[in-house]
Image: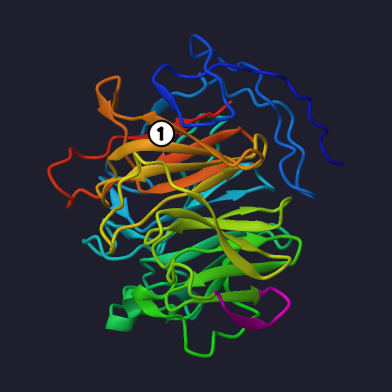
Amino acid sequence: MRWRPRLAAVAGVLAGTTLLAGSCASPVPGSGNAANPPAAAAEPGGPLWPPTTLELPIRTWVPRPLDTKGGPVPGGAKHSRVAFDSLRGRMVLAGGDVRHATIGNGNGNSTIWAVDLERGTPWELVQDWCSGRGELMPGTPDSVGWVYASRHDQGVMFPGFYFITQQDRWCPESREVADAVIYDFKSKKWLPVPFPAPPNGWGGDIGASFAAYDPETDSIYRFRNGGTIEILSMSGSTRVIPSGPLDEGGNRDQTAIDVRGRNIYRVGRGTRSLIKYSIRSRSISSVSPLPRQWVRPPDDMETYLAFDPIHRVLLLPNVETFGGKVLGLGIYHLETRRWEWEAAGEVQGLLVRGNVFGFDEKNNTFLLVGGHPAEGTLPPVTVYWLYRYQ
C-alpha cells in the first residue's frame, strides 16, 4: 500500500535573492517556515510520501552537526556521491577520498553511509570497509558513479577511479575488483552488475565520474569525456551513443535527471550553459546560458547539480574547489527556463561548503556535505547542510 500525499502550499524567499532578467519568481518578505511542506509525489511510479515532520525555513542554508572523527566524511572528503534511497526515505553516501581508520589516509572509500533527515539521527554505517571472506567488493573506490536503482532496491557503483588499479588492497580476504558493482540493500552484499563494461572500458579518473538512473527505462546514463553517452541497462545491455560536438566531456559534472520530463541535465563548462540530453530523442542541446555570476571551477574540479521534482527546479551550487566553498546558488526553473541567483557566505558563523550534493524527495530538501581539508586554508568540516527551496 502506497501512502497518499497531502499537498500544502508554502511561500517565501530568503532576502538577498537575485532575480535574473525575466525570472519567473517574485520575492516576498521574510524567509517563512515550512512546518508542513509539500509531500514528495516526485516521480511517476515512485513512493508517495506523507508530509514530512522535518521543519526547515525555506531558501536558507541550515547546518547540522557532523561527526568529525567517524561518519561518512570524517574531517572532510572529496569525490563522494550521494543518492536518494526511495524505499527507506534516506540519503545514501558512497565512494570518495575519505580519511578512514582502515587505511590511515584519504585515498578511497569502501564504506556506505546513510542518514534519515526526518528522524534527525546520526549517520548510520550501512556497509563497513571490507566484505566477508571471498566476497565481492569494489577495490577502494574513489571518484565513482553512484545511483540508487529503485526498481531493484540496489545501489550501482562504477569507475571513475578505484585505487585497486594502483595495487592498493586493504581487504586481502575479500575479492576486490576494479569493475562496476551492485550493492544489494536487502542482502547487504556487493554483487556483479548485469551489464558489460563499455567497449573501451570504464575510463578511469578522466572517463565518467557521475551518472543518473532512469526508472522508466531501468537504465543508467553516463556522460563521458570524448563526446559519448553510455546507457547501461539493468536488463543486461550496454550501448554507447555519440553526444555530438556540443561541449564534449562531462566527466567532472554531476548529472540530474527529470524522469517526468524525460531529460538529463549537466553543466557545460566550455559553453557556460545548461546542457540537456533528451532520453526520448537521444539528442543533446544547450537550453540556457548559466547565470553571469557563475564562476567556472578549475578543469579538474567538479560541478554539482540536483533536481527538485516537486517544484521542478534545478539547483546549482557554485562550488569553488574541492574545499567546498559555495560562491553562490543558481536556481533554474524548468517550466519557464529562467534562473535565479542567491549569494552564499556564512550562516551562524559557519562557511556554507560541501562537495557532495543531492535531493531528498521524502523531506523536500537538498543535502550538501563534505569539503576537502587539503584545499586552501579552510577549517575542518564540522557540519553538513540542508536547503529547502519551497
Furthest-front residue in this view: 21
Furthest-right residue in this view: 1
Identify which residue, 193 or 40, lies in the foreground.
40
Rendering quarter of residue 237: bottom right
Task: Left or right? Give the position of 164 relative to 307.
Answer: left
Disc 1 target residue:
385
Dot 1 crowding, Cα within 10 Å, few <14, some 14–19, many 20+: many
How many callouts does the rendering have? 1
Q: Could you say where residue 43 lies in the image, as x and y percent from the top left? A: 73, 46
Taking the spot 72% from the left edge, 20% from the top edge, the residue there is 8
Q: Is residue 162 visible?
A: no
Q: Is residue 121 visible?
A: yes
The way the protein has been coloured in the rendering is: rainbow
Q: Please, is residue 286 above or below residue 29 in the view?
A: below
Is residue 311 within the magenta segment?
no
Q: Please, is residue 323 above or below residue 55 in the view?
A: below
Please provide the residue range marked out in magenta: 233-243
Taking the spot 38% from the left edge, 66% from the top edge, the residue there is 143
Instruction: Quadrant for the N terminus, please.
Output: top right
Furthest-left residue in this view: 377
Rendering quarter of residue 163: bottom left
Q: Could you say where residue 186 lies in the image, as x and y percent from the top left? A: 66, 59
Taking the spot 67% from the left edge, 47% from the top edge, the residue there is 86
